[in-house]
Amino acid sequence: MSKLNIIIIFILFISVLNADYTNLLSQIADKYENAATFEANITQINHFHQIDHSLKSEGNIYINNGINVIEFITPSFQFIKLERNTLTIYMSEFNTAIIKNSLDNNISAILQFPKLLTNDLVFDQKDNEFLIFDYTKNFDGINDIKLYIDEANLLINTIYYYDEMNNLININLNNQKFNQTLSKDINDFVIPEGVVIERL
């Protein structure tokens, strides 16, 4: 077999492989985007490189009727709520809330993580039981995003990215539930009275 034929076969193989993963991403995106409700446990680790410190936060994510909420229970209670074009961040430790009417913050992008499954995401490699996908460009201020997708159940398991300050963020999703009654009423996530509110 000539070198030219080998090259042609290799190119055809890569083209078929990329088409397969494009179809796979489409199936995964449909599963998340078409879910009436979604709930999962979330563990987020922020690696602050400038001070050589890591912070681990644990809680839950809820999605229902276009309202997305991340609730962190440890190390201190806070919630991040995205409703239409309004982003609300409440931090009990500081008795403070931030309300922002624009979506240029990378927090809101993670709240809408199913939208990460776009054509800009390409297959990188297989690592044990996970399929790893990389972004070809930045996503709303988030850099070098990697999505780890469980090959067995085709669920997003881990999201890695660098924020605008070049800190590494590691998010793990577990116990994912689709189209089930949420364990909490999403409307209960409101700013308590007496909290200092900053509007941006």
Image (cartoon, rainbow, N blue to C red):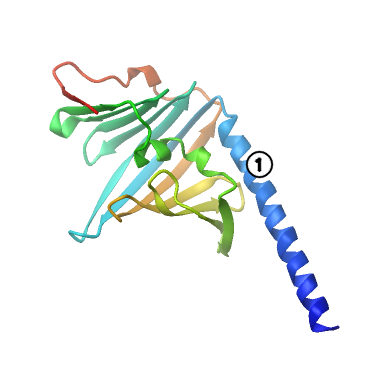
Q: 138 and 132: which one is in front?
A: 138
Amino acid type of the residue tagged 1 in the rendering:
Gln
Tell me what residue is drawn at x 42 percent, y 39 percent. 109
In the rendered view, does 170 fall on the left or right side of 35?
left
- Up the image or down, 8 lies above or below 194; here it is below
In the rendered view, does 78 fall on the left or right side of 117?
left
What residue does disc 1 label?
A: 27
Structural crowding at the residue carrying mark 1, measured as other residues with C-alpha within 10 Å and reported as few (<14), some (14–19) or many (≥20): few
Q: Position of residue 130 (x, y in %)?
A: 55, 57
Q: Position of residue 56 (x, y in %)?
A: 28, 49
Q: 174 and 61: which one is in front?
A: 61
Name the image quarter holding residue 34.
top right
- Up the image or down, 176 lies above or below 171; here it is above
Tell me what residue is drawn at x 40 percent, y 25 percent. 85
Q: Position of residue 10 (x, y in %)?
A: 75, 71
Name the image quarter holding residue 107.
top left
Which quadrant, please, contains the C terminus?
Answer: top left
Residue lying at the far bottom of the rendered structure:
2
Give the number of callouts: 1
Which quadrant, please, contains the N terminus?
Answer: bottom right
Q: Position of residue 99 (x, y in %)?
A: 27, 26
